[in-house]
Image (cartoon, helix red, strand yellow):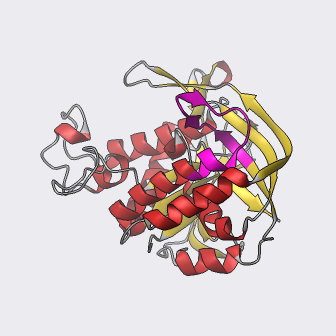
Amino acid sequence: MTLLTHHLHITFEVTGPLEIDNNAGSAVRGAVVNALLNRFCANQTAPTCADCPLVRVCPVAALVAPMRDTDEPGGEQRPRPYVIRPPQGRRYAPGESLTFGLGLFGRAAELFPYIVMAAHVIEFQGLGRRLEENRGRRGGVRLQEIDAINPLTGAKQPLFRAGKRQIQAPGIPIGPAEVASFAITLPEDRLTLRFLTPMRLIDGGRLVKQPALRPLLQRLGIRLTDLSMAYGDGPLPAADARALLSLAERAILERNDTRWIDIVSHSRRTGERTPIGGLVGEAVFSGNLAPLREILVWGSLVHVGKNAVKGDGWYVVER
């Protein structure tokens, strides 16, 4: 599997009172997608990207609504080549910084210039809820900086700084070699998963409300296969996947410090309300975990479970 990921930190200075609901990832994703569509969509009359004759050659569609080629297996649309890592705060005062993350998969990093321009559009759109103290407007923000980061090592590359003309291309790709190098430093028999945003998994038609490695790895294997087929050079071998699931089934939940939270996402376009809640907190697993380390690290990069593209399913693997 040769999937590559790029991870960005995008930082704004808050210029007016700003408040984000609990579904921060959904709010940030909406701001980014709307900015891309408002700034770059060449066919605003099309009801959706799928209905537009330009969909195969449009950079906006490549990010927000990528379509499969006719000979590709799966549904009509590919998995989206990005995930949002939402800001951790909910209310910001003028002068404070607001940072969110954006993970890009495969060649989506080549569309980085569009991300920069979309970030500038967010300055005009505003971010967060409409507040009475802002005269019914969203919170004001001003783009300050964009960095490429390696979430595994903390390495950082400055890409954009306010007031400077030069913009650098993302240059910290994370792929199989980087994942393997980090995974081998993790313990072989005891791992902590810290769920930073709701982990929403369904197993056997039911929501998973207690941490368990087997359903997590089962869904993660499907996600990595979809992403690698769409943006890499092939999936995890089926035999390896079956062996990993068997090990995951035998892992012991040694400590459970998670809780379930209920959150609803509201779509202005369709009017639909979608539950995006799940497990947050820490879970400690023990057992023969050495063969599971790499795939778990991959999951920390691409997210797993429902609504991953909106920021759900973000976790870190800790020693």
Left/right of residue 94 with respect to residue 277 in the rendered view: right
Residue farthest along the left direction in this orientation: 53
Residue 46 visible in the shown view: yes
Residue 316, position as x, y percentages in the image = 71, 57
Q: Is residue 216 left or right of residue 48?
A: right
Which quadrant holds the C terminus? bottom right
Question: Can see residue 9?
Answer: no
In which quadrant of the rendered view does residue 318 lie? bottom right
In the image: residue 165, left or right of residue 70: right
Identify the residue at horizontal 47%, vertical 37% (top origin).
Answer: 30
Q: Could you say where residue 196 lies in the image, as x and y percent from the top left?
A: 72, 46
Please tell me which residue lies in front, 69 or 53: 69
Which quarter of the rendering shows the N terminus? bottom left
On screen, 65 above or below 295? above
Q: Give the residue drawn at x 37%, y 22%.
A: 270
Is 55 above or below relative to 180?
Answer: above
* Residue at image coords 62%, 56%: 246
How many discs appear? Answer: 0
- Nearest the camera: 158 or 266? 266
Identify the magenta region.
195-217
Q: Is residue 208 above or below residue 195?
A: above
Above or below, 224 relative to 266: below
**Residue 276, position in %: x, y?**
58, 30
Position of 8 with respect to 66 (left or right) is right
Residue 242 percent coordinates (x, y): 52, 59
Question: Does the stretch in magenta take in 209?
Answer: yes
Q: Quadrant of residue 232?
A: bottom left
Is 51 included in the stretch rendered in magenta? no
Q: Residue at x 20, y 49 (%)?
A: 55
The foreground one among 33 and 254 is 254
